[in-house]
């Protein structure tokens, strides 16, 4: 009997020992696989393309982006059935994962499992300005890995993910919309028209979420995942890395399955900022229905360029014509809810070319938008802000200043080619040294006689708009 018991204990001990060896061997293989994947990620340096891009001002859109380098690396790169990266677009790269994926935020890596395939690695900088080497070099790279192993899932999500960077030029209001919020709207409308997706942000900033909170909440009902602030692994049914951009302040309905336009984006803004509406400031005139409300958008005191040097005289002329004038001097801390309430209740917006004119997105259709265009900014004025007016069915006026109205005349002389023929200077592109002259050295002193004529045209349009409001 003792021999039988002894034999049984020995067999059990042997079995347990074998199981322990098997478990240890399995874990070693798994850890070895993940270690090899991490080594591949570290060794795979798909450096950002050194392609050179040129700008041609003679195109209909005023800007043409043309790659001079070989297109060899800008092609659709399939990775089995797990994910694919399309690098054929001029403005952005786009990677899609069409099946389950695990995000490890500590390594900024999305894993997909494919036991039968070797490890494949792709990298992407999810920011839609790939034609600008300087800024793209500052955007964090994210990894996509397909292989036999992946980390265990800590948090499981039922909704897919849209992944992008909030770095780059995002601190500038124009770029926050042009390179961020509008492309996010396009991407969501293209892939997830039901609006059920999770925003995953690289290079997240608290101020960014705070400033655009209302818009982000309307875009997605789910909490935002910030890569740099998370260390738990997340599982998604699928994911899209990168944002689709159609051009400066543009949404092309022919490129979206749901045929969305800039007007649909304006509807989203209305939904975001009228859920808890902020009442606009009381009108200045005792009979507000008789006087159109004009918002004069000015650059802040901390900005030394593109200011209206005779602003007090300009305001006097505006009032003489019949406007109630509100001076709007936004800064990075300006509440977008308050700005929306003010502009959504106004009839006219006037301002010198600059990022503050992005607030024109808050204007109502058939209201009036007048852009003061400094010397040398003609193509940018049309491409950046003229398109807002066209996309929102807003009456658009341009007041193009003359040489005598530019502060550059005192420095360079009225016969300098910089002032006489800016298009000739910009034929070979818009290098920083030329751009800085027109954007960072120039102020305007408006010809009150000539500007009065443009204001009268704006007044007639505003009165017509007011009449249709009744």
Image (cartoon, grey):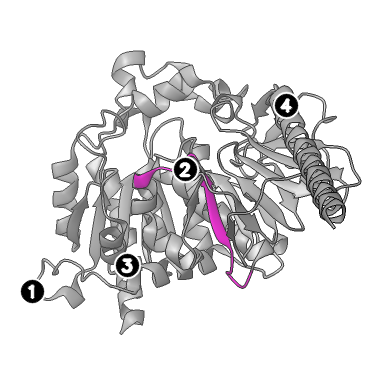
Give the distance between the C-alpha atoms of the residues marked 2 and 4, in whole angstroms. Answer: 36 Å
Badge 4 or badge 1: first in the primary sequence: 4
Give the distance between the C-alpha atoms of the residues marked 3 and 4, in whole angstroms. Answer: 54 Å
Residue assigned mark 1: 286
Badge 3 or badge 4: first in the primary sequence: 4
Q: Quadrant of the C terminus?
A: bottom left
Q: Secondary structure at mark 1?
A: loop
Badge 2 or badge 3: first in the primary sequence: 2
Residue assigned mark 2: 175
Q: Does the rendering let one see residue 87?
A: no
User: Residue 48, position in %: x, y?
Assistant: 68, 26
Badge 1 or badge 2: first in the primary sequence: 2
Give the distance between the C-alpha atoms of the residues marked 1 and 3, in whole angstroms. Answer: 20 Å
Q: Residue at horizontal 85%, vertical 29%?
A: 72
User: Residue 28, position in %: x, y?
Assistant: 76, 35
- Nearer to us of marks 2 and 4 is 4
């Amino acid at each position: 009997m003792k021999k039988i018991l002894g034999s049984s204990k020995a067999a059990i001990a042997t079995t347990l020992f074998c199981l322990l060896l098997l478990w240890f061997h399995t874990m070693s293989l798994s850890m070895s696989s993940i270690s090899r994947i991490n080594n591949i990620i570290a060794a795979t340096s798909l450096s950002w393309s050194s392609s050179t891009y040129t700008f041609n001002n003679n195109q209909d859109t005023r800007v043409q982006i043309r790659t001079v380098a070989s297109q060899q690396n800008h092609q659709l790169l399939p990775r089995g059935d797990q994910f694919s990266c399309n690098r054929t677009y001029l403005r952005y790269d786009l990677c899609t994962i069409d099946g389950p994926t695990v995000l490890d935020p500590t390594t900024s890596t999305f894993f997909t499992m494919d036991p039968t395939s070797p490890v494949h690695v792709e990298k992407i900088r999810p920011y839609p300005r790939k034609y600008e080497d300087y800024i793209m070099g500052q955007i964090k790279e994210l990894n996509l890995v397909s292989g036999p192993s992946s980390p265990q899932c800590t948090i499981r999500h039922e909704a897919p993910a849209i992944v992008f960077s909030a770095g780059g030029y995002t601190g500038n209001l124009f770029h926050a919309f042009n390179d961020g919020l509008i492309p996010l709207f396009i991407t969501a409308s293209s892939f997830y028209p039901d609006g059920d997706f999770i925003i995953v942000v690289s290079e997240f900033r608290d101020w960014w979420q705070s400033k655009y909170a209302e818009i982000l909440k309307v875009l997605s009902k789910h909490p935002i995942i910030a890569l740099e602030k998370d260390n738990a692994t997340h599982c998604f049914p699928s994911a899209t890395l990168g944002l689709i951009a159609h051009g400066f302040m543009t949404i092309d309905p022919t490129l979206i399955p749901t045929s969305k336009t800039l007007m649909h984006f304006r509807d989203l803004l209305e939904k975001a900022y009228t859920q808890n509406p902020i009442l606009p400031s009381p009108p200045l005139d005792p009979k507000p229905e008789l006087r159109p409300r004009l918002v004069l958008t000015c650059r802040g005191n901390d900005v030394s360029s593109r200011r209206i040097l005779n602003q007090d005289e300009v305001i006097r002329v505006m009032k003489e014509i019949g406007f109630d004038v509100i001076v709007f001097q936004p800064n990075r801390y300006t509440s977008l809810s308050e700005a929306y309430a003010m502009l959504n209740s106004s009839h006219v917006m006037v301002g010198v070319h600059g990022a503050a004119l992005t607030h024109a997105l808050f204007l109502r259709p058939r209201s009036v938008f007048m852009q003061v265009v400094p010397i040398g900014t003609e193509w940018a004025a049309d491409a950046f802000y003229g398109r807002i007016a066209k996309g929102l069915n807003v009456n658009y006026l341009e007041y193009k200043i003359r040489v005598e109205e530019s502060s550059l005349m005192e420095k360079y002389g009225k016969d300098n080619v910089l002032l006489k023929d800016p298009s000739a200077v910009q034929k070979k592109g818009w290098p920083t040294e030329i751009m800085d002259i027109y954007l960072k050295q120039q102020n305007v002193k408006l010809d009150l006689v000539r500007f009065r004529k443009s204001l009268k045209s704006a007044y007639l349009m505003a009165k017509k708009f007011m009449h249709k409001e009744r």
